[in-house]
Image (spheres, rainbow, N blue to C red):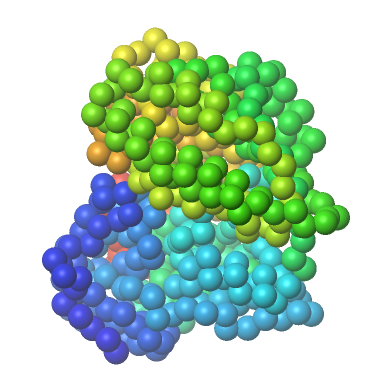
Amino acid sequence: MSTTASAKSGTWRNWAGNVTARPVREVTPASVEELSAAVRRAAEDGLTVKAVGTGHSFTAAAATEGVLIRPRLLTGIRRIDRAAMTVTVEAGTPLKRLNLALAREGLSLTNMGDIMEQTVSGATSTGTHGTGRDSASIAAQIVGLELVTAEGSLLTCSATDNPDVFAAARIGIGALGIVTAITFAVEPVFLLTAREEPMPFERVAAEFDDLVAENEHFEFYWFPHTGNCNTKRNNRSSGPEKPVGAVRGWIEDEFLSNGLFQTVNLLGRAAPATIPSIARLSSRALSARTYTDIPYKVFTSPRRVRFVEMEYAVPREALVETLRELKSMVERSALRVSFPVEVRTAPADDITLSTASGRDSAYIAVHMFRGTPYQAYFTAAERIFTAHDGRPHWGKVHTRDAAYLSAAYPRFGEFTALRDRLDPDRRFANDYLRRVLGS
């Protein structure tokens, strides 16, 4: 087993830099057996255990003062079953590597989020999702998973094998065990045609229900301090493949969306009064475009500008009213917001603590550039989201606790009872889980 004191400073930091932890030790297991041994040794030493992926969560879901597990050696595809159309993948595999490997095999996930830097276990455990009329989060595509429990044993689950664990562990927030492998349903690779175009806020609000109903995947970005949105519609296509040209792709996806966006955010951080003017320019910078490509090249895009994010799921029918209240709040306030607000949808699913559990949902994500004070904006936004029965994304900034969440989730008690059974000594606990699940 590879056991190291820790990284250089002994401090773990997440991608956004807003969460830090100082574990007693770090372990990088090369096998499931080594991972099980690390959990058993932690129990002997009276230490808690948490696994970390790439640190793309903005909450302290993975933070620990005990043993930090880095699953970077637990990667790769374990098995492809073409008869069942499933793929089993090691928990530490980055989504990027999975998407590339599936594409080489002529396969694809049905839906995915908008970045692919996370590990498969980190992304699914926190409920990472894209947008979809009929297809839901990445976790909703799981048909089986394997996890090491608090006693160091290996537990497999599916709809037929330990179904109560399966219902909860697909989005387990690290509370039920350490996921070691995931089996996803896949399908033959297909083409998506993306249609991106600017649209006035009022038109998007008026036509939202139709835009969701008419498109397999609809999302939009509203630019605060403006009445402008950028919309994106992704639908299956019979082809031909027509990707974004190399030059245009570099200009729009690298130069404008990353390089120039970083520069204007630095300017906005230094001189907040310039942000409304910058927002008006930014909202007009990207022109309409249509392209056709394989799914991961359409769903995902590089995000190099670092930020802090809050995202809530509200009942889909409450989306327009909630967003109007957010827009009105920003316009009335002295806030200066340089990042667009992202809106996506998901159908109801049957995962115990999924943000879409039992209800069709719409997601509103608010962001602030890293290093910019975000508390006032997020606090005001959260007040609006919670007034509409919002459920916070488990991996994004929020202040909710078990009292609120137990009312927001009809099956909350089912999850905590399972946690009591699988982890009675709270081997996988940390401050975040104590807050959101209770102790």
Where residue 368 sits, quadrant-wise, is top left
- On the picture, is 221 further left or further right than 57? right
Where residue 30 sits, quadrant-wise, is bottom left
Residue at 67% in and 75% down: 104
Residue at 39% in and 29% down: 338
Q: Is residue 15 visible?
A: yes
- Front-most of residues 365 and 195: 195
Report the residue that reaches farthest toward the front. 247
- Front-most of residues 142 and 129: 129
Q: Is residue 318 visible?
A: no
- Residue 281, given in percent of the width and then of the height, sits at 47, 24
Report the residue that reaches farthest toward the left. 9
- Residue 235, given in percent of the width and then of the height, sits at 76, 46
- On the picture, is 36 further left or further right than 365? left
- Residue 13, given in percent of the width and then of the height, sits at 25, 57
- Residue 309, given in percent of the width and then of the height, sits at 39, 40
* Image label count: 0
For the N terminus, give its image quadrant.
Answer: bottom left
Residue at 47% in and 13% down: 328
Report the residue that reaches farthest toward the top. 332
